[in-house]
Amino acid sequence: MKRTKIAGIGYYVPERVVKNDDLSKVMDTSDEWVQERTGIQERRYGRKHEETTSTMAAEATRIACERAGIAPEDIDFIIFATLSPDYYFPGCGVLVQRELGITHKEVGALDVRNQCSGFLYALSIGDQFIRTGTYKNILVVGSEMHSMGLDFSTRGRNVTVIFGDGAGAAILQPTEEPGRGILSTKLHADGTYAEKLAFINPGCHGGYHFKKLGEEVDFGYPSTDTYGEIFLTPRMMQEGQYYPNMEGQFVFKMAVQKFPEVIREALDEAGLQASDIGMLIPHQANLRISQFVQKRLGLRDDQVWNNIQHYGNTTAASVPIALCEAWEAGKIKNGDLVCLAAFGSGFTWASALIRW
Ligand code: UT7
């Protein structure tokens, strides 16, 4: 039976390192608070106006292509996961296509908006296309340029200290090797808590969801029957309502429940145990969350890869960056069972089991 293998992976992080102490110069925070609550020591920020979500994705893709032994022109479908796109529309899929110089082939390009689990959702879509024989070289890429959209005042500190920039890419190809490749992907969502971790303005909601939830939020909508100003009002600008929001403790509690659940679901279906996992790559949301998941599953330190200490949370890029780093460090070998897992805004969560 034909399965999907990851034929090449690559990642790119910008050069500029931003330490916790750099952030404490512009907002009321401290290295001690950030490290104690999240494990983060530093993160990377892209070069403003020169690097973007799609240019970083192109850097990661070139490396992934080289390792897969293909040229970017050989890519026959693009799946791009991000929550921090260059443009509101069109999506980053077409921009990375242009950046890679493969517009002459007019291959399809799809954008996935599933935040922290975006890469896993994208991987799952690519897996279906490979197994059905539709495409032979699919680019799955997750990239984020968070630094351009964060609140650097003390008001935004609970979110801003966590996020960093970067990109990770994988080239998917078919394989006939018995037992090898993506064994399963598990995708889940629960929109009940959509606003618990969200970037809601500008948007066309016009306050609808908040009214329905019984919450009074003043977005500064004009009282007159006009349309255009509803998307982005002066109040949204004045009050900085266009930044991400997170109820951290609520998200944390859900994350530590859903990560083990979705990993166990995949293991149970495959008739495998947590002890069979060669490497678990959890989405890098918080070192404390990863440690909790590790403990819950009874995994040793050498079975889990964490790099949030150096990159912060890079949302859709975090899983492929960590996967690539672990592979580059020689911690993932042919035949190993690799488990990817993510949880985040939506809420959406997912896992993938791969026989490398
Ligand atoms: O990737 C998507 C999924 N995201 C996650 O899974 C994130 C899940 N949540 C978390 O990781 C944690 O909730 C955070 C790291 C975001 C926050 O840690 P916490 O231990 O839950 O802190 P908290 O939000 O309950 O805030 C505790 C205190 C508050 O002060 P008071 O009210 O106790 O005086 C905050 O105002 O810490 C304060 N605080 C900060 N202090 C210094 C919040 N952010 C900061 C900060 N520096 N950056």
Image: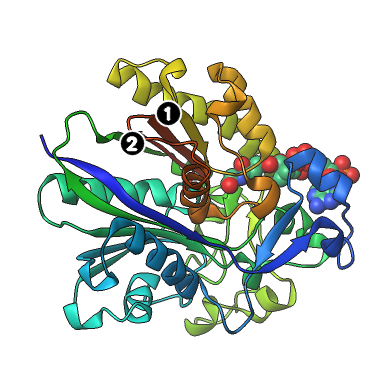
- From this viewpoint, is residue 350 visible? yes
Q: Is mark 2 within 8 Å of ligand 1?
A: no
Q: Position of residue 89 (x, y in %)?
A: 40, 76
Which part of the image, by quadrant, shows the C terminus?
A: top left
Q: Quadrant of ligand 1?
A: top right
Q: Residue 57 appears in which quarter of the rendering?
A: bottom left
Q: Position of residue 112 (x, y in %)?
A: 37, 58
Q: Which residue in the structure is indicated by mark 2?
A: 356
- Determine the residue positioned at 62% across, 72% down: 46
Contact between marks 2 and 1 (CB within 8 A): the answer is: no
Q: Dot 2: what SS?
A: loop
Disc 2 packing (10 Å; few <14; some 14–19; many ≥20): some
- Determine the residue positioned at 53% across, 27% down: 303
Q: Which residue in the structure is indicated by mark 1?
A: 262
Q: Dot 1: what SS?
A: helix
Disc 1 packing (10 Å; few <14; some 14–19; many ≥20): many
Disc 2 from disc 1: Cα separation: 20 Å
- Determine the residue positioned at 74% across, 71% down: 239
Q: Residue 155 appears in which quarter of the rendering?
A: bottom right
- Determine the residue positioned at 35% across, 26% down: 266
